[in-house]
Image: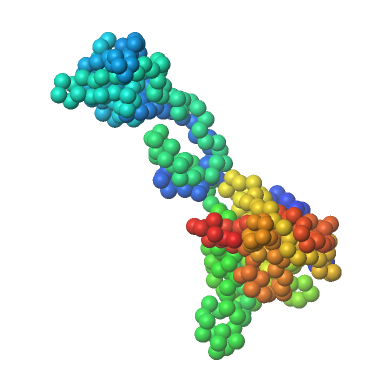
Amino acid sequence: MRRRSNSYLSIQTAFIELRKNIIIQPMSEKLDTKEALGRILYNNIISSSNIPKYDSSHMDGFAVLHDDLIGATNLKPITLKVIDDIKLGNPKIKPLQSGHAARIPTGGYLPKNSDTVVPIEYAQFNLFNKSVKIFSEFPIGSFISPIGKDISKNKLLLKKRHLIRIQDIALLNLLGIKKLNVFKKPRVGIIPTGSELTNNIDDVIQYGKVLNTNSQIISSLIEAAGGIPIDLGITSDSIKAVKKKIEYAISQNDIIVTIGGSSVGHKDHIADSINSIGKPGILAEGIKLDRGRVTKIAILKSKPIIILPGPIQGAVNACIVLAIPLIRSLIGLSNNNKTTINAQLSDNWKARNKFQHFVKILYVHLSISKSNNRINAEPIIGETSNMTVMTRANGYVMIPEKITSIEKGSEIQVNLLSGFSFASRNPIDFI
């Protein structure tokens, strides 16, 4: 049922409506382990072998029998015959007998019967007669990593929904796991609409067109969230053109995001186009979000369509509360962004009078105070179409419907967003 334009859904209700009416579910794909950095595991990883595979030395030194060390001192060292020089990765080693030793590197497998390793610092090797003097006793088992000490066979190593990091790839390579099942990234078709838009800066200068920057920002946010953005190009304000583009987007993508053409009280080409294609069509014509209240949600052929406003703040806000959580839910993550930092608000903030009881997104600039080394959050205020609000901000605060003001000095929780708060390659320097 199509809702009246003055009937706003809560963000939570809008997301639930969107999620329950679509058929797309989390799916898996197989990747080479070396290409899985930053992806989310689709299943548990169980160790198929022990690491180390055999009892191993964790020092450079000599593998010996403990009983042969009894009584060894600096004044009265014991001398053993060195019968072997163990190479890394070689499990075929002669067993040791009493009176014998074997040179062993860190990580080398111990010969049978040996039960102690003497570090090289406590021994004196004679290359000429292949013997070693040992100047100290050591407890049995010293400097040995028993079989399976690091990883035991059938041990749960990485859980489903684990984010693959560099060290995880090294571990998986160590176990010989060359392929991984990871959550498949959803394809997100992006349709910027508006006859006034152009991708050519010369058109802005000569003909007064508007540069299509919003689709670039939304594409980058979607990619950072884990989706695959597919920019389908500028579409003119024509029901026929929009309808054709949406039909194509539905056939090729998992999620569709449109930008612009969403309004209250004016002709809405997006909504009219969607409803002309089929049912259920538009599910909600507005959400309780400031800014971004004219955001709409729709379903066609069991695929979700999120209609973002044209002004940049409203578009980004709606992307944050609807598109990004939907993408996260499809790649094995929780809906909510959990990358946050506590900060102190540096100035008073008050909600706009008209939409005080909506969820508000407050953009802030984070910086470190030189006086007390605390993190300050400066409120960034500006019109919904002002790009400078975005460029000055490096974090945002989700303010619940019931809160209409926050006093200077209050402790707040600031959300960080990859690509927005910091460049993905350098998150340390964002403040």
Residue shown at 60%/80% (left/top)?
Answer: 210
Q: Nearer the viewer, residue 124 or 113?
A: 124
Up the image or down, 198 lies above or below 155; here it is below
Residue shown at 40%/38% (left/top)?
Answer: 173
Q: Is residue 296 visible?
A: no
Residue 51: quarter of image = top left
Tell me how many marks there are.
0
Q: Nearer the viewer, residue 20 or 292?
A: 292
Left or right position of 41 against 260: left
Residue shown at 73%/51% (left/top)?
Answer: 16
- Work out which quarter of the rendered image holds the C terminus and state it: bottom right
Q: How is the image coloured?
A: rainbow
Q: Position of residue 243 (x, y in %)?
A: 62, 69
Residue shown at 81%/69% (left/top)?
Answer: 352
Residue 257: quarter of image = bottom right
Q: Position of residue 361 (x, y in %)?
A: 72, 62
Left or right position of 176 against 375: left
Q: Nearer the viewer, residue 107 or 300?
A: 107
- Work out which quarter of the rendered image holds the N terminus and state it: bottom right
Q: Nearer the viewer, residue 280 or 118?
A: 118
Q: Position of residue 77 (x, y in %)?
A: 28, 16
Left or right position of 377 against 24: right
Up the image or down, 41 lies above or below 94; here it is below
Left or right position of 101 against 5: left
Q: Point out the residue furthest to the bottom here.
A: 206
Q: Is residue 389 visible?
A: yes
Q: Position of residue 133 (x, y in %)?
A: 26, 19
Q: Point out the residue furthest to the front here.
A: 75
